[in-house]
Amino acid sequence: MTAAPDMTAALPPESARDTPTNPATQRRKLVEVKNLKLYFPIFGGLLRRQVGDVKAVDDVSFDIYEGETLGIVGESGCGKSTCGRAVLRLYELTEGSVVIDGQDIATLSPEKLRLKRPSMQMVFQDPQASLNPRMTVASIIGEPLDEHTNWPRTKKLERIYELMDAVGLNRDYANRYPHAFSGGQRQRIGIARALALNPRFIVCDEPIAALDVSIQAQVVNLLEELQDQFGLTYMFISHDLSMVRHIADRVAVMYLGKLVELAPVSALYANPLHPYTEALLSAVPEPDPFAETRKERVVLKGDVPSPSNPPKGCNFCTRCPKVMEICREVEPAFREYAPGHFAACHLLEETGTAALNGGMRPEHNQTRIQQGEDA
């Protein structure tokens, strides 16, 4: 069996456009997440009383600037997708605030939240499960227009055709059903639906995870083109670190419901500060076989602790190869160790890593990835 090609092989070393190295000075914050917590209750006993909580997202804070892409990475079960859904308030928050374009959606009434929905949308992970098999493509893309506008049928149909053109779908497919399409085409339908109401912010929840590698490249390129065309802001959740390196401006690393590192993409990939980030990056395959054989692989021992019973101190202390005694007792603070480069690790406090070079030029939008067959 032929191994799937590594997408980083098609990426040139320099960025094709200048992205600001310090977004705080040139862009305004579109999304502000502060102390976000999302706990799922655990019930037990004869009376079905609450006996604990699954801490899916535990005290997470970050900002997303207008027009940028924030990548969220981490192992399965770390809380990436739950965090994305919580930011859009698809789940009710346990604590914290989520301010989108000046409004705290955590405190909005159901009526006001519904009026806010057109400005924030989501592209789901499974392109087949997210589409109603009993609805045609035109009905799926036009459903947001039915819910949030009172346009006449002709205007809606015109908008549907515009969206199909934007995502590369033939207008002749408007009356077909989802089962007649490939995975890449289904994801294009989902993207068109998300764009129907001209949103400013889109959460992309692993939109390429269920697709072939060649189709992944096409979908990511499409997202980048739409971002340039419509001025979109993305929260891009993915397992694929090489793809996140291509599309993101900044990257946040999650472990067991918490952020452990947040940095511009170049700074994080060139100089990771947290031991967990080092382990994740060491697992990314190198396209050069000689570099792959020379690379030192960081293998983490043990299993991820349960989010219903996280360890005392640092969540990563049970698997960290550089663990210290203080890690098992005191939770590390999430601090800035270089311009725009945040991490939560006692090791950095001990060694004093403030002299690191930060604010490196992001590798976002380096040029479109080489594409294979049409999606």
Image (spheres, rainbow, N blue to C red):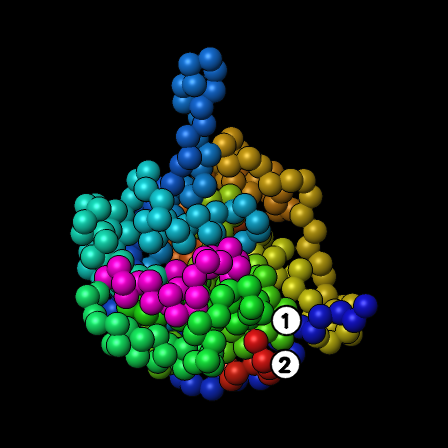
Answer few, some or many: residues within 10 Å of disc 1's Cα (few below 14, many 20 plus, some between 14 and 19): some
Residue named by callout 1: 213
Judged left or right of residue 322, residue 157 is left
Q: Say which of 113 and 76 sits in front.
A: 113
The residue lying toward the viewer, choosing from 13 and 68, is 68
Q: Secondary structure at mark 2?
A: loop
First reached walking from the N terminus: tag 1 or tag 2: 1
Locate residue 345 relative to residue 202 in the image: left or right: right
Residue sitting at x 58%, y 37%: 305
Going by the image, does 341 lie left or right of 219? left
Q: What percent of the width, then of the height, locates residue 297?
A: 71, 58
What's the mark number on residue 372? 2
Confirm whether residue 39 shows in the render. Answer: yes
Q: Position of residue 111 (x, y in %)?
A: 18, 49
Q: Pick the residue in front: 160 or 104.
A: 160
State the image quarter where residue 232 is shown.
Answer: bottom left
Residues at badges 1 and 2 in contact (C-beta under 8 Å)?
A: yes
124 falls in the magenta region: yes
Spatial separation of the CA atoms under disc 1 and disc 2: 9 Å
> Residue at image x 42%, y 35%?
40
Name the amino acid, label 1. Val
61 up-or-down from 162: above or below: above
Mark 1 residue element:
helix
Give the residue at x 43% y 66%: 136
**Extreme residue in the bottom direction:** 16
**Quadrant in which residue 203 is drawn:** bottom left
Q: Which quarter shows the C terminus?
A: bottom right
User: Which amino acid lies under the numbered mark 2 shown in the image of this protein?
Assistant: Gly
**x, y percentage for residue 207?**
50, 63
Start-end of magenta stretch: 122-148
Image quadrant holding the N terminus, namely bottom right
Mark 2 is surrounded, within 10 Å at the Cα level, by few (under 14), some (14 to 19) or many (20 or more) other residues, namely: few
